[in-house]
């Protein structure tokens, strides 16, 4: 990430708001995009809401796996609601300005919910590991009290880190352009607008990303590697198919979630490709 040179004091301006560019380069598609994302948002909310209600109301689904699934559905709705409503508002009104406080609040909630999802996916992988690899001990290990503690930890353990990271980023001086080349307040485009040395901020960003992104991903990957190796060693095709069916949906969610995150944050940007 390029560090802007320290400007003179006269060139420093205290920015009170940003402009989310989003899809500003496609004005002819604004209403099409608004309708498309609105439909997607409603479908996702209804799907997650249905999963949440069914898992709470159906007595046959009162198991740890569905308890974690209902929490993940609710968490996914919260995560999307931190970004999509603002994007829809910007597309519908063409008013793309967002205050510093609103931008910081959005960033904090996005990464709190995102970090919680990463941890909860690791917890769900552990649940499947116990169910498949130690089925006799499953009722003893995954007690309801333990499940509540695991979910509570996933939701809350990252809150101080994400609040501290957000406060550190928005305590930086911003100068020059106030245009964020994104549809929500994400860390990389915000840091590009900061003046002065941002090494400490980048170091904290990478530390938080490792703790709440990379570590849960590696734990989930390692857990599923163990699960798959044990399933493949089962004696019959029927038992293998049954074991795969209990974790296939969660495995698909893991691939989609972490795959999209890797594509978004680890791909080289167009400028780096042109320079190479």
Image: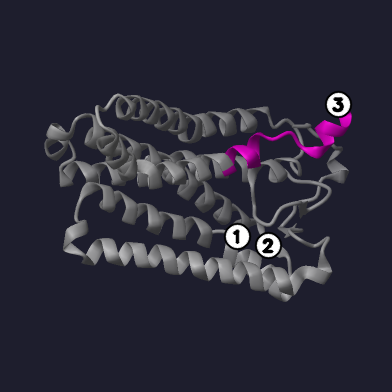
In the rendered view, does 76 fall on the left or right side of 264?
A: left
Q: Is residue 256 magenta?
A: no
Tell me what residue is drawn at x 38 percent, y 43 percent.
248
| Gap in angstroms between the C-alphas marked 3 and 1 | 37 Å
Location of mark 1 (residue) = 102
Closer to the camera, 6 or 227?
A: 227
Q: Are marks 3 and 2 in contact (CB under 8 Å)?
A: no
Location of mark 2 (residue) = 98
The quadrant the C terminus occupies is top right
Q: Residues within 10 Å of mark 2 (few under 14, many from 20)?
A: some
Residue 203 picture location, percent across and down:
60, 27
Range of the magenta residues?
260-276
Select label 3 or label 2 by which is in front: 3
In the rendered view, does 82 fall on the left or right side of 68?
A: right
254 shown above or below 44: above
Residue 182 picture location, percent across and down:
71, 53
């Amino acid at each position: 990430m390029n560090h802007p040179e320290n400007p003179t004091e006269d060139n420093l301006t205290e920015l009170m708001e940003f402009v989310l560019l989003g899809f500003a380069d496609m004005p002819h598609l604004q209403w099409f995009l608004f309708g498309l994302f609105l439909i997607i948002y409603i479908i996702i909310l209804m799907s997650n809401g249905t999963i949440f209600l069914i898992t709470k109301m159906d007595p046959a689904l009162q198991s740890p796996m569905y308890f974690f699934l209902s929490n993940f559905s609710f968490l996914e709705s919260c995560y999307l609601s931190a970004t999509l409503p603002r994007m829809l508002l910007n597309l519908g009104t063409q008013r793309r300005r967002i205050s510093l406080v609103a931008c910081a609040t959005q960033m904090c909630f996005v990464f709190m919910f995102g970090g919680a999802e990463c941890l909860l996916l690791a917890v769900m992988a552990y649940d499947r590991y116990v169910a498949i690899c130690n089925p006799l001990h499953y009722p003893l290990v995954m007690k309801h009290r333990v499940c509540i503690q695991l979910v509570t930890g996933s939701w809350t353990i990252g809150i101080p880190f994400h609040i501290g990271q957000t406060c550190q980023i928005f305590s930086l001086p911003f100068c020059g352009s106030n245009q964020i080349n994104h549809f929500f307040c994400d860390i990389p485009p915000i840091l590009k607008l900061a003046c002065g040395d941002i090494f400490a901020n980048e170091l904290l960003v990478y530390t938080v990303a490792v703790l709440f992104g990379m570590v849960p991903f590696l734990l989930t990957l390692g857990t599923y590697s163990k699960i798959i190796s044990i399933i493949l060693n089962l004696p019959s095709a029927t038992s293998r198919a049954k074991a795969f069916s209990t974790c296939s949906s969660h495995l698909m969610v893991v691939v989609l979630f972490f795959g999209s995150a890797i594509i978004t944050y680890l791909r080289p940007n167009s400028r780096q490709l042109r320079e190479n």
